[in-house]
Image: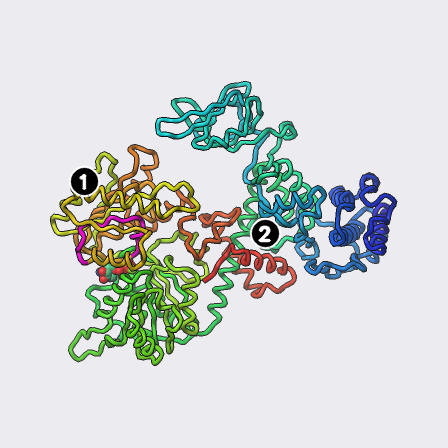
Amino acid sequence: MVSSIEKLLKFAKLEIDRGYDNRSVFGGLNYIAPLWDQEAKSQKIDSALVENITAILAAYDSYNLEQRKVAIAEIISTLSEGAQAGPAAAESAPASRPTSATGVEQPTQRATRPPEPTGSQPRPAPAETPSQPAKMVELSAPLTVLSGIGSKKYAQLKKLGLETIGDLLYFFPRRYDDYSKLKPINRLEYGEKVTVIGTVMSESTRTSRGGKTITELIVSDTTSFLRVNFFNNPYAAARYKTGDQLVLSGKIDTYLGRLVMNHPDIELIDQQHLHTNRIVPVYPLVEGITQKDIRSHVSRVVERYAPLVADPLPSFIRKEAGIPDLRRALQQVHYPDNEDLLKQARRRFAFEEIFYIQLGVLSQKRSWKAASAASYSITDDYLAQQIQRLPFPLTGAQRRVLDEIRADLASGSPMNRLLQGDVGSGKTIIAALAVLVIAQNNAQSAIMAPTSILADQHYRNLTRLLTQPIAEDEQPPLRPEEIRLLVGDTPESERQEIRAGLSSGEIKLLIGTHALIEDGVEFNQLQLAVIDEQHRFGVNQRARLRAKGQNPHLLVMTATPIPRSMALTVYGDLDLSIMDEMPQGRQPVNTHVLSPRERERAYSLIQSQITSGHQAFIICPLVEQPDDDQPDPDLEKKAAVQEYERLQTSVFPHLKLGLLHGRMKPDEKDAVMRKFQQKVFDILVSTSVVEVGVDIPNATVILIEGANRFGLAQLHQFRGRVGRGGDAAYCILVPEKEDAVENERLMVMTQTNDGFVLAEKDLEQRGPGQFLGTRQSGFSELKMASLSDVHLIEKARGLAHQLFERDPELQNPENLELSRRLQAFWKSGKGDQS
Ligand code: ADP
Ligand code: MG
C-alpha cells in the first residue's frame, strides 16, 4: 500500500481508539492536512480523492464528536478504496478492505457496504458512477460538518431550505452568468436576454404621470450607456451607489426609442470571476448570505461529495433516456464546462423528477388495478333499448366512452377513470348510463357536484332520464323515490329519511354536494362514485367519497381540457377518456375581440338580446392585487360591486341586474344563480366565480371585461356558459388596453371553439400553474422539470413501466437507492395522490 495512505489509515484508526480527541497526531489532523496532501499527490494518488480527504482533515478540528465519527469513517472507507485503485493496489488490498469502519459506530442511516468480490477492481471511468449503493455517503449530515459553517451560518442557510449536505448538492442555481460571453452595451439588441457588466454612473428617482415611482440607474461600460429601470421599487435600486460595478442580467426592452433594461437581476461584480472566463452559477440568496459564500460552500460540497453519491437511476434507464450520471450532472449543473453539458445536466434532473412522478402515479395505478371490485354489466340489447329514452342519438365520442366505462365496470377491478369533455359535450348522460348499469344490478351510486344548483340540475336531469317509462308497459330503470338529492340545506327530517334509505339500500342513487361526504351518510353498498367538475374538489374530499364504499368504481369528470402532458402527470394514475366531439347542431359561439372604445357595441348587443327575451353574463376583470401570493378577495368584491353599480345606474338603468362574487357564501351564490335561472335578472354581473357548469340555456351573450388577464382555458370555460340552448350565442372579449401585443393572444379565441387546442396554447403561454388545483399543487414545486414537455414525460413513463416489469417492488439491490429517493420525493409533498 502507498505509504501516505497507510499512514493516514493508521492515524484514523488511532483516532478511533483514542475516542476522536484529535490527538492521534501531533498538532491534530488538521495540522497535517497540507503535508499529507503534498505527499499523497506526489505518490500519484487520484487528486480528487486526495482533495476530498484533505478537506475533511482540514476541518476535523471544528467537528463535534458525531461529526468526527462520520469523518473518520469516511476517510477510512475512501482510503481503503483508493488503496485498491492506486498504483500500488495490486500488492495490497483485499485484506485491508472495507470492514472499513471497524469499531466505528455507524450512524444508522448510513448504508452498509455489501462485501465486494475479491481482488482489485478496476476503478470505473470517472464519468460513470457505479450504481451499487456502496457509494452512498452521509448526505443527511448537517451542513455544520463543513468547515466555515457554524450555528449562525447554519441558521441563515436554513432559511434557504438548506440543512444537509444533500440539500446543498441539490441547491440548483437560479441562473448562470456566462462570463465567457458577455456583451458590450453598444451591441445589445432589443428583446434579447443578456448579461452585461457596467459601472453605475448615476441614479435618480421620479414619479410618472400614472403615479408610478421610477428609479433609474445609468450604467456604463466603456462602449455605451444603458438605462436600468425599476418601477415602484426604489429599494431594489437603492442598494447600489454611483461607482459600483455591477453584473446585470435581464431582457432588453425599449423606452422612447432607447434600449433599457427593466427589473434586471443585479449583483455586485465578483472580481474573481471576471477573469475566469467561464459559466458561473448564481444562486438564490437570503439576508446574511452572499453569492460568494454560497458558491464556495457548494463548490466544496460538489467537489467532495458528488463523486461519492449513489446514482438512484439504474444505468439502463440513464442509457435509454440519454442522460448523464448523477456525479457528472451535479458537477455540471453547478459549474458547467459549457452550455451543452449544462443542458444535459439539467435534462437529467428534469428527467429524474418526472421519473419519480411517473413511478409514483404508475405504482398507484398498479395497486388500484390489483384490487378487486364487484363486476357489473348489462346486455347490449338492454342498453340499446335504454338509449332510446334519450331525446337524441349519442355522439360517436359518447359511445366510445360508454364502451370504455362498461368494460371497466365489468373488469373485476375498480374503475378509476377521468372523463374529460369540453363544456357541453354531454358528460351527464354518460354518468347517467353508468348509474344505470349499477342500478340494474341493484347496487348504489353517488354523484357529487360542487354546488347545490348543479346538484339540483343533475337531480332533475337524471330523474327525468332514469324514471320515466318510454312505453306504457315499460319498466324504467329506477323509481323516482330511488333517487334522492342531498345538499347543504336539505332539512333534517329529510336527511334522516335519506340516511335510512341509504343504509337499507332502498335509495339507489344519491346526488348532492359536499353534504354527501359528511359523517353519518352511510351507504348499504356504494359501488359507483361519480365526481363532477372534479377540479373543484380537494384530494381529501374525493378520497372521502370513495371511502363510503369498498373499492367502488370511480368516475371523475372535468370540463377543463387538460393537455396530454399534464394528464399523464397530474392524473397519471387514472385511465383517461376524452370526449372530443360536440353533439350535432351545436352552433359555435360567435366570438369577437372588441377594443375598450368599442364597448358600446357590446352593450347594444346585450340590449338587443335581452329585448328578444334572452339573458346575458358580464364578467368583471380580475383585480390587480398588490400581493399575488395572497390575493385579497375583498378587493375583488369591491371592484365587482363598483362595476355592478355603474352598469345598473348608467348603462342598463331599466334592466334587472344580479351580482355574484367570491365573497358570498355558497348558498348566497346559489340563490343568485337560481334567480338568474328563473329570469329574475336580465344580466348577471360576476367575477370569475361563475365558471362551473350550470345550464342557463336562455343566456346568449357573455361579455368578458379585462379579457387579457384570463388564460385561454378559462375564457373558454366562460364562453361555455352560453350557447347551451338552440339560439345563436355571442362571446365578447374586451381587453383592458387598446392595441397591446398581448391582445393578439385573444384572437385564438375567435378562431377555434376547441377546448383542447386552447388548453395546449394556454399551457404554452402561461405554464402549468393554472392547471394545478388542490390535488396537484405539489407538482408546481418541481425544480427543473417542465410539465409541458410531453416527450420527456412519455419517455419517463415508458421507462417507469419497464422498470416495474423488471422489479415491481423496487426491491433489487440496484434499485434500493431509487426506492429510497422515490419515497422521499413523494413524502416531501411533491406528489400528492387522491
Ligand atoms: P357537460 O359535458 O358540459 O356536462 P351536459 O351533460 O350538461 O354537458 O350536456 C349539455 C347539453 O347537451 C345538455 O342539454 C344535454 O341534454 C345535451 N346533450 C348531451 N348529449 C347530447 C347528444 N348526443 N346530442 C344532443 N344533445 C346532447
Ligand atoms: Mg357538466
Total numbered labels placed on residues in the image: 2
Q: Position of residue 191 (x, y in %)?
A: 43, 30
Question: Which residues are the magenta region?
Answer: 678-692
Between residue 188 and residue 141, name the one nearer to us: 141
Q: Position of residue 638 (x, y in %)?
A: 31, 45
Q: Amino acid at mark 2?
A: Arg
Q: Quadrant for ligand 1?
A: bottom left
Closer to the chain start, of discs 1 and 2, is 2
| Secondary element at image label 2 | helix
| Residue topped by disc 1 | 650
Q: Which mark is residue 480?
A: none
Q: Amino acid at mark 1?
A: Ser
Residue 44 covered by magenta stretch = no
Q: Is mark 1 within 8 Å of ligand 1?
A: no
Q: Residues within 10 Å of mark 2 (few under 14, many from 20)?
A: some
| Residue topped by disc 2 | 318
Q: Residue at x 64, y 50 (%)?
A: 164
> Could you tell whether 525 is left or right of 673 in the image?
right
